[in-house]
Image (cartoon, grey):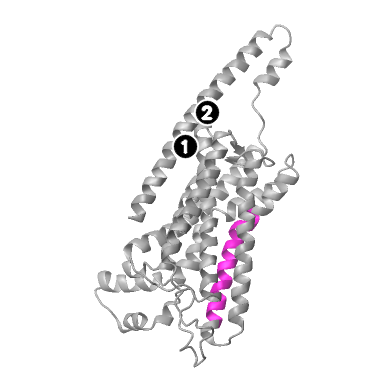
Amino acid sequence: MIQILLSTFISFIIVIVSSNSIILKSEDDKMNHFLLTSSTVTASNDTTTIIKETEPPSNDFSNEQIESLDKIVYFSSTMGIVGALFIIISFFLFKAARTFATKMIFFLSLSDLFAAIFYLPYYRESDLMCNFQGMGLVFFLSSSYLWTMCISISLFMVFFTTIFELNHWFKYFHFICWGIPLLTALISLIFHAYGKTGSWCFIADPTSIFRLLYYLPLIVVFFINLVVFIAIRWKISQHSNSLVSKVNIIVSFYLIAFSLSQLPTIINSIQNFSNPDDPQFSLFAFQLLLQPLQGFLNCVVYGINEGFINHYVEFFEKYIFRCRCRKSRELKEIDSDKTSLLVDYENSDDEEGFDGMDKLIIDDYNRV
């Protein structure tokens, strides 16, 4: 049911983008026609004025640099799409894997998938498609980093409180992760904020309030995740056993994946805001290399740790090779070998559980 509602929601967004963009394009065509007419009227008096009024604005980068950025984004977006699709397909394929944790990771991957698609350089040829790309990127990139915040909040609640049942929080997570990006994207569209920046279309003016509407929440989420993961690492560092050490590594990977994908974007936005007339090609290149790659990084960190690999091993053994070997049965019986977000501290290396946390990070409360 959630998937059907989400598909309807995304289709509704696309309809809004298309209808509003057509209106904007019509208005822009009227304005261009007016400028061209004005320039033609003054042609007999000042030829230089005609050239200035009809000349298109120059790009921030040369054609060679734009082509280089396109090659980078083809690679990173492809990897991001593949990684996001791995988690999405696994979620639908393996019903046993549909836990509270994987449901959040599924929606995170859905946002990563569409963000990587919208990063592809097919949208800058017309105002209609440019607005479409700009709104798509604002919506899905914002949704992606908000889902990472919701995941970190869930981890915090499990580690530092006695609250383990979090399924009822999903309605609030959906409201935050879809509602806020939609509002930001629509406001930017209404005020004609989208335009070409670098090799793609986004909020054009790096010093505008609309850029702040996107980047300020991103910076806030970045530091929330940073504080939460540091706190979690401190919490589990108080206990020394092999299983806790493994969880410590996993939590570190969460922070590394989010930092790799978002930190170049934050640095580039700060540079653009402080010096909008001097964009740095290297910063744009790093942003395009790592931000569309987020789906792949999340696949490595979340997907493998959620045990999807073990489900695939069992699937191929059962349906492809027509056998279920002893190793597969052992993987199914030993929960700790799944390296999931469900860990039993109480039975780990004979260490005592701490603070009633014998369930680890996010338990599979209600299966779909």
- Residue beneath the point at 67% across and 49% down: 269
Residue 74, image x and y in percent? 52, 49
In depth, the one of 203 and 313 nearer the eye is: 203
SS type, badge 1: helix
Count of marks placed on residues: 2
- Farthest top residue in view: 44
In depth, the one of 217 and 30 nearer the eye is: 217
Task: Tell me where residue 93 sits by quadrant.
Answer: bottom left
In depth, the one of 137 and 287 nearer the eye is: 137
Residue type at mark 2 is: Leu
Residue type at mark 1 is: Val
Residue 89, image x and y in percent? 37, 60
Q: Are marks 2 and 1 in contact (CB under 8 Å)?
A: no
Q: Please name the residue that numbered disc 2 is placed on.
A: 24
In this rendering, would 309 be left or right of 230? left
In this rendering, would 237 be left or right of 170? right
| Mark 2, other Cα within 10 Å: few <14 / some 14–19 / many ≥20 | some
Residue 256, image x and y in percent? 60, 66
- Farthest left residue in view: 322
In this rendering, would 352 be left or right of 103? right
Q: Please name the residue that numbered disc 1 is placed on.
A: 17
Above or below, 19 relative to 41: below
Residue 23, image x and y in percent? 49, 27
**Magenta highlight range:** 245-265
- Farthest bottom residue in view: 350
